[in-house]
Amino acid sequence: MQNHLIEPSEVEQIIQQVSYKASIITVTLFDAVGKVLAEDIYADRDFPPFNRVAMDGIAVNFSEIEKGTHQFKVEGVQAAGSPQMTLQQTENCLEVMTGAMLPQNVDVVIPYEWTKKDGDIMIVEDFNNIQSFGNIHQKGSDHKEGSLILKSGSAITSAEIGLLATVGKHEVKVYSSPKFAIIATGDELVNVEDTPAPHQIRMSNCHTIQSRLQEEGLDSTIFHLKDDYEDLKQSIQSLFDEYDIFVFSGGVSKGKFDYLPQVFEELGVTKKFHGVKQRPGKPFWFGVTAKNQPIFALPGNPVSTYLCTNRYLIPWLYDQKAISAPLVKKYATLAEDFTFKKPLTFFLQVKAYYDKDGKLWAEPVKGGGSGDLTSLVKANAFLELEGQRSDFSKNEKLPIWFYKK
Ligand SMILES: Nc1nc2c(c(=O)[nH]1)N[C@H]1C(S)=C(S)[C@@H](COP(=O)(O)OP(=O)(O)OC[C@H]3O[C@@H](n4cnc5c(N)ncnc54)[C@H](O)[C@@H]3O)O[C@H]1N2
Ligand code: MOO
Ligand SMILES: [Mg+2]
């Protein structure tokens, strides 16, 4: 029986409706990078918390500058990390260091570079840029105490870590990582460390999927199941008890030993689709278990597995807040004419690069089809050529899916 094939855009819609229920956990700040924030973060103090000296120099009272005073006796030194000092005599100055609290009774900082020292007197030589509150990072000018500075759902990168540290979040609420099972199927597969017999190959898909997830900060466990109907049924059933998300590779096409769709059906899994109007990756199967656990059963050819991982699984994980760095849809310009046989959307392997004007070009990479792993390392992205037509011209702007950063 012929499967009903759906468009790549429908795949996106269907998988988006399936949600992995990410739970919220508390981690220390040091384990938070790469996670997604699960709480709103407010400023615990003003940003900055005091009038912060922004240049090393002297602090004076601006009214003295207006009066034309240009020599100031040094009363003392206000260092960063010392309590606030007070200028006693308005006509004097205090030396002040970047990061220090601005002393009381002063309202301008004059950098050392604009002054000359003569004993305990500082002589101002350059008045050109002196203005009231110059070189002072004013209290609360960035954010007021209590204001929202990071929204729940934000990706925690090294930049956010700085902000979380500043407001004292040594423990942070984040979305937990799902438990992933990656299942390689096929009697022909042997382990990486084994020497394959002439009729065997080493398994690679499970490792590309696992490392792709690892690149996004997610752990997973690999299993290898043989093409034995009863074994598959038993093993998969027990995996359902242990894991949240399942990514299979192989065993979903029309072969005599492509048992997965039938096994899933017998295990009560609801099929959402089987077959996508795309090349590679046409036999992609997707469904959910009775407990609503998603199953991505990806076609076994290595380029198909890899394309489906990058085009569907990774963006879905981003939607689920399981990963923080989106694999966003971007657009690139086709660098040469390209023709393929419609009507399946064609995911063209391309080498994408920016030219000196900042324009993103996509140059087709010649490969041996969806079984050719070597083409994946020559290319760095897939260009999505929709299947309504066969001829695409140089300079056309098309959606691109990067898998290398
Ligand atoms: N009569 C038809 N035959 C095929 C069709 C079709 O529509 N009608 N579709 C073809 C397409 S397209 C693809 S893609 C493959 C998908 O096959 P399966 O998902 O059933 O995968 P397998 O048959 O198990 O294996 C296919 C191929 O991939 C290799 N493989 C599988 N797992 C791994 C792994 N973990 N690491 C490396 N390589 C793996 C496997 O050895 C096979 O060479 O079906 C076409 N056939
Ligand atoms: O389309 Mo299959 O996914 O070519 O190998
Ligand atoms: Mg097969």
Image: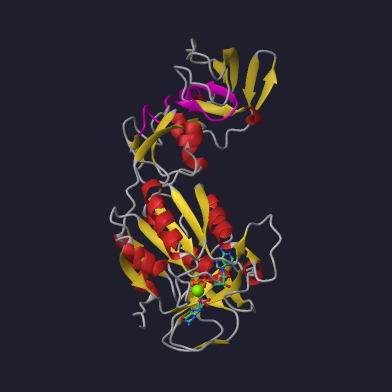
Q: What residue sits 44% from the left and 28% below the top?
A: 170
Q: Is residue 183 above or below residue 102?
A: below
Residue depicted at 36% across the width and 28% down the height = 44
- Residue 329 position, x and y percent, is 45, 66
Q: Position of residue 361 (x, y in %)?
A: 58, 73
Residue occupying image coordinates x 47% and y 69%: 251
Q: Quadrant of the N terminus?
A: bottom left
Q: Is residue 42 above or below residue 14?
A: above
322 left or right, relative to 222: left
Q: Nearer the viewer, residue 145 or 20?
A: 20
User: Which quadrant of the structure image shows residue 55?
Assistant: top right
Residue at the (34%, 71%) spot, across then down = 273
Task: Using the rendered view, name the quadrant where residue 167 is placed.
Answer: top left
Left or right relative to 231: residue 122: right
Q: Which color mode does the image show?
A: secondary structure
Does 267 appear above or below 73? below
Pick the quarter of the image with the C terminus: bottom right
Give x and y (percent) for residue 364. 61, 78
Residue 366 lies in the magenta stretch: no
For this view, does 115 lie left or right of residue 24? right
Q: Is residue 49 magenta?
A: yes
Residue 242 in view (yes/no) = yes
Residue 147 % position (x, y): 32, 35
The residues colored magenta run 42-64
- The answer to whether residue 312 shows anywhere in this view is no
Foreground residue, 112 or 295? 295
- Determine whether 175 is above or below 348 in the image: above
